Amino acid sequence: MSKRTFLKGAAILAVAGFIVQILGAVFRIPLANIIGEDGMGFYGTVYPIYVFILVFSTNGAPAAISKMTSEKLAVQRADEAHRIFKLSFIAMAIFGIATSGMLFFGARLIIQLAEVHPDSYYAMIAIAPALLLIPIMSVYRGYFQGMQNMLPTALSQFTEQVIRVAVGLGLSVILLNMGVQYAAAGATFGASVGPIFGILIIAAVYLKRKKQIFEAVNIDKNKGGEKEKSSSILKTLAVIAVPITIGVSIYPVMNLADMILVQQRLVFAGYSEDAALALYGQLSGFAGPIINVPMTFALSMALSMVPAIAAAKSANDIELLNTNIKLGFRTSMIVGVPCSFGIIILAEPIMRLLFPLQEESGVNAAGALAIPCRGNHLPLHSTNFGRGTSRSW
C-alpha cells in the first residue's frame, strides 16, 4: 500500500469521522437544550454501557477482519479473504443477538447493580436493538477496509448518523411532554434506527461489487492452495480482536466507571438523587461530546493504518511499514496537540456558545470539559459546593 493510498484512505475516514462527530454535536447540543441536564443524565447513564458493549464490534472485530483480509489479498487469496468475511458475519451475528438480548432483558438488573436512576430503564431498552445491528455492519466495514477501500465505511457512517440524528431529535421533541425520561429514550432509539440504514448502504455497495469480488474469488480458488480451517480463522479473529478491544476499551471503561461512580459518590456526599443525575448530565451530555471531536481523527488514522501495515508486513516491505507507522503518529500529533490546548483555554466560551438555552448548566460543565485535557489544575467554575440539591460542580 503506497503512502499516497494510505493518506487517501485516512483522509476519507477522517472526513467521514469529522462529519459524523459534527452530526453528533448537532444531535447532542440541541438535545441538551431540549431535554436539559436531567434528560442528558438519563441519556448519559445508558450510553457508556452501550459504547462499552460495542467496543468489540466497532473497533476490535473490524480491525481484525481488515488485517486478516488484507493479508490474504496480499498473497492473492481472495477466496480465503471472502471466507473470513462469511465466518465473521456468522460470529458477529451471534454476538449481536447475545448482547442485544442481555441489555434488553437485563436492563432492570443492570440498573439495580449500577445503582443509577431507575427511570434510565426506558432509554436502555430503546438502545438495545442497536447492539444486534452494529456488529453485522462492522463485518462489512472490516472487509472493505481490508481491501483498502474506505469509502463504504464512510458512506455507512454518514448515513447511520444522519438517520440517528433525525430520528433521535424528532422523537425527543415528540415524547418530551410525557417526561424527560421518555424523551431521552426517544433520543437513544435513534441509535437503533440509524444502523438499519447504515447496513442497507454498505450491503448495497457489496452487492454492486459482488460480481467483481466473486470473479477474484473464483480465480484464486482455482489456483488451489491450502484452505485454512474455519476454527483457525475464528481463533485468529479472536486473537487479533481481543487485544485491540482491551486497548481501545480504556476510554469506554472510564466512561462506564464514571456512570457508576459519579452518581453514587454524589449521593453519598449528600446530593439528592435528582441533583446527582443532573450533575452527571452536565459531565456526560455537555462536556463529553466536545472532547470526542478531536479523538475522531486519531481513530481514523488507526483504522487506515491497520490494513496498510498488515499488507506491508505480508509483502515483507519493512521500509513501507515503518513509513506508514511514523506518518500515522506524526499526523495525529499535529492535529491532537492544538485541539487539546484550544479546549483548555476556551472551555467556558465553547460551552456558552453551544448551549445557549441551558447556559447555566453549560458554564458549570466547562470545568469538566477542561480538566480532562490538563489534569486537576483548573479551578471549578462554581464556588457552591454545599450539600443538598445544588447542581453546580
Image (cartoon, rainbow, N blue to C red):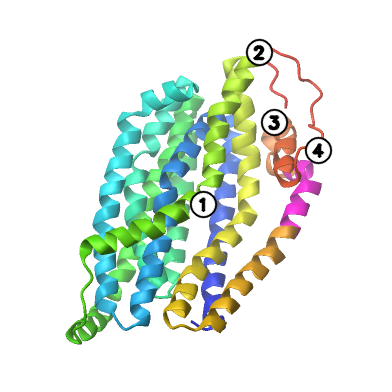
- Report helix, strand or loop for mark 3: helix
Answer with mark 3 or mark 4, whichever residue precedes in sequence: 3
How packed is label 2: few (under 14 Cα within 10 Å), some, or many (20 or more)? Answer: some
Q: Which dot marks residue 270?
A: 2
Answer with mark 1 or mark 3, whichever residue precedes in sequence: 1
**Left or right for 84, reference 183:** left
Q: Residue at x 28, y 41 (%)?
A: 98
Answer with mark 1 or mark 4, whichever residue precedes in sequence: 1
Q: Quadrant of residue 185?
A: top left
Q: Quadrant of residue 357?
A: top right
Q: Residue at x 60, y 61 (%)?
A: 297
Residue 268 location (% of width, % of height): 62, 15
Residue type (three-letter) at the residue carrying disc 3: Ser
Q: Quadrant of residue 31?
A: top right
**Left or right for 390, reference 109:** right
Q: Which dot marks residue 361?
A: 3
**Left or right for 333, reference 341:** left
Measure how far apart labels 2 and 1 are at the Cα level: 34 Å
How packed is label 4: few (under 14 Cα within 10 Å), some, or many (20 or more)? Answer: some
Q: Main secondary structure of the magenta part?
A: helix
Answer with mark 2 or mark 3, whichever residue precedes in sequence: 2
How packed is label 1: few (under 14 Cα within 10 Å), some, or many (20 or more)? Answer: some
Residue 389 location (% of width, % of height): 67, 15
Q: Which residue is mark 4?
A: 378
